[in-house]
Amino acid sequence: MKRLFLPFLSLVLVVFGCSKQLTAPSFIQFKVENDSLFVISKNDLASPLYIKIIENKTEDTLIKQLEPKEQYTLFKYTTEETDSNSVLKKYQFKGYYGRYPFTEYDTNFIYTFPFQKGYTSKIIQGYDGSFSHKGTFSSKCIDFDMKVGDTIVAARDGIVINVVTKHNKQGVTEDFKNYGNYVMLYHEDNTFSQYVHLKQYGSLVKIGDSVKANQPIALSGFTGWTTIPHLHFGVYKPAENGLVSIPIILDSISGKSLKRRQIIKKL
């Protein structure tokens, strides 16, 4: 049996700690101008991003939606009344992929299997797998048997929003969960797909690239929290506290019907 790495529940978790000088998350910037302190949210992604601003004392929450490459001034203070460290002590800033509230997506869209035509694979684990496909993030994901170095293709047109392929570690304990290389795509209906356990430096795309379905995007690998080489594949929609996996159709086959040990050949 294998252990599965489950990456990116949210873009950034709470950035709040015990150190004297606190560090802002990547999507929060501070600017001092004319004795004023501006707290700016900035989205450097090629996909939408929504930010939760939570006041620690009251737990009052504000959600700010940012489109790709957009920035917005959240707060303005005088430099006499506060500084950046005080702001980071007062608020938690959490960032998540996509648009929220989420309305709807194309439930009838037909994805292609994430490997090349003529390739034969075996299902290692399907939806709601008792071993590791539990919880909202992973319950509707599929594991495909793939050898190290085999070609992974995009299951749908999209934009590359994240790539991690520097790791070369694999293990069977949770300690290795952050070493699973992956590529993540954003799709036009506000959904995302992710391809995990890639070969070190096995990405064939870079952040910001537009890709087409069936286009090679990566090489399969053996990295992260797993016992065998395989591809972990999932499609996600935004929810209140990050992405959740959703059921899909693959080459006219319901993902729900794909069971462990089932053999699949892409025609």
Image (spheres, rainbow, N blue to C red):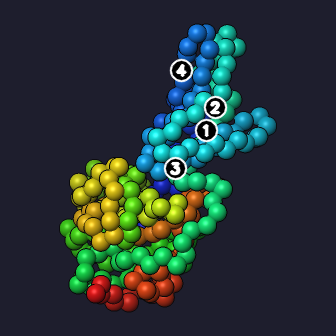
- Dot placed on the residue nearer the N-terminal end, 4 or 1: 4
Distance (Cα) linking label 4 and label 3: 23 Å
Instruction: Say which amino acid is labelled 2.
Output: Leu
Asked whether residue 220 appears in the rendered view, the answer is no
From mark 3 to mark 2, how far is it between C-alphas?
Answer: 17 Å
Mark whose residue sits in front, 4 or 3: 3
Q: Nearer the viewer, residue 68 or 135?
A: 68
User: Disc 2 and disc 1: Cα gap in Å?
Assistant: 11 Å
**Circle 3 is placed at which residue position?**
48
Quadrant where the N terminus is found in the figure: bottom left
Which residue is disc 4 drawn over? 31
Q: Reply above or below: 152 against 144.
A: above
Secondary structure category for the residue under label 3: loop
Under mark 3, the amino acid is Pro
Residue at 33%, 87% (x, y): give it: 264
Please report contact status of discs 4 and 1: CB closer than 8 Å, yes or no.
no
> Of label 2 and label 4, which has the lower sequence position?
4
Which sits earlier in the primary sequence, circle 3 or circle 1?
Answer: 3
Q: How many marks?
A: 4
The x and y percentages for residue 10 are: 53, 52
Query: CA separation, marks 2 and 4?
Result: 12 Å
| Residue at x 61% of width, y 38% of height | 93
The picture places residue 59, in percent across and down from the top left corner, at 76, 41
